[in-house]
Amino acid sequence: MDALQRKNRRLILQLVLGGLLMFGFGFALVPLYDVFCRITGLNGKITNTGPVAVEEADSSRDIRVQFIGVNNEAMPWEFRPLLNTVSVNPGEMRQMAFFARNPTARRMVAQAIPSVTPSEAAQYLHKVSCFCFDQQALEADERMEMPLLFVIDKKLPPDIHTITLSYTLFDITPVLPVAQIKTADIQRSPL
């Protein structure tokens, strides 16, 4: 084997090894990103969910909470908050809801993905109950109100006066086997 063939073989081996390392790194990025966001609070990921001890509200502060509902480009549903803005005292448990309607002629399943702005506020927003915890199924032309129950921690930094809670609604019907599609009847409010 001459020197040129050895060089070519070594180059091919390096390229294959480099490609495998890049694939492995790309595969590991998702869990690493989730850990990074959880530690730093970046990207507005909310980790405070479930029951919370009720405290007396801090009536000396008013926090403006804005709600935004948007659809992923492939999602045909009507989706919006029933109120765009509410004023909340830290420590106060607050309930509000989003409206959803499936205008299509078929049953669809959706999943809402939340985001909080500013991202530093995410660790102080505690969701007790949220439609985003479960997949939402709607029959053709069905509509419902999807509830959200939340508390803002009293430890919210004093320089934060407005929090924006945004939900993006995704169509997940094609990715679920029919046996897994369930309707969250306990969250439904007839209109």
Image (cartoon, rainbow, N blue to C red):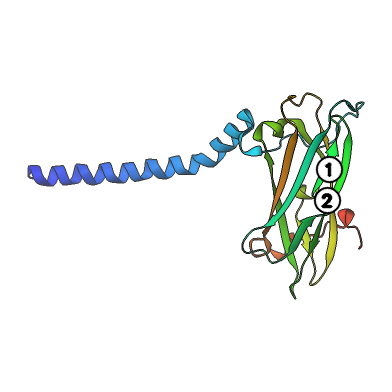
Give me the residue at 75% from left, 59% from top: 79
> Which label sits on residue 86?
1
The spot of residue 121 in percent (x, y) is: 71, 32
Q: Quadrant of residue 142?
A: bottom right
Name the residue nearer the viewer: 31 or 43. Answer: 43
Q: Is residue 3 left or right of residue 105?
A: left
Disc 2/disc 1 C-alpha distance (Å): 7 Å
Instruction: Tell me the quadrant of the picture where the C terminus can be found.
Output: bottom right
The spot of residue 39 in percent (x, y) is: 62, 28
Q: Is residue 9 left or right of residue 89?
A: left
Name the residue nearer the viewer: 148 or 10. Answer: 148
Q: On screen, 31 above or below 172?
A: above
Name the residue nearer the viewer: 89 or 35. Answer: 89
Q: Quadrant of residue 162?
A: top right
> Disc 2 marks which residue?
83
Crowding at label 1, few (<14), some or many (≥20) Cα neighbours within 10 Å?
some
> Which label sits on residue 176?
none
Give, as a three-letter code, the residue at label 2.
Leu
The spot of residue 38 in percent (x, y) is: 64, 32
Q: Quadrant of residue 149?
A: top right
The spot of residue 14 in percent (x, y) is: 26, 41
Crowding at label 2, few (<14), some or many (≥20) Cα neighbours within 10 Å?
few
Instruction: Tell me the quadrant of the picture where the N terminus can be found.
Output: top left
Give, as a three-letter code, the residue at label 1.
Val
Q: Secondary structure at mark 2?
A: loop
Q: Are marks 2 and 1 in contact (CB under 8 Å)?
A: yes
Give me the residue at 91% from left, 29% from top: 54
Q: Is residue 8 left or right of residue 145?
A: left
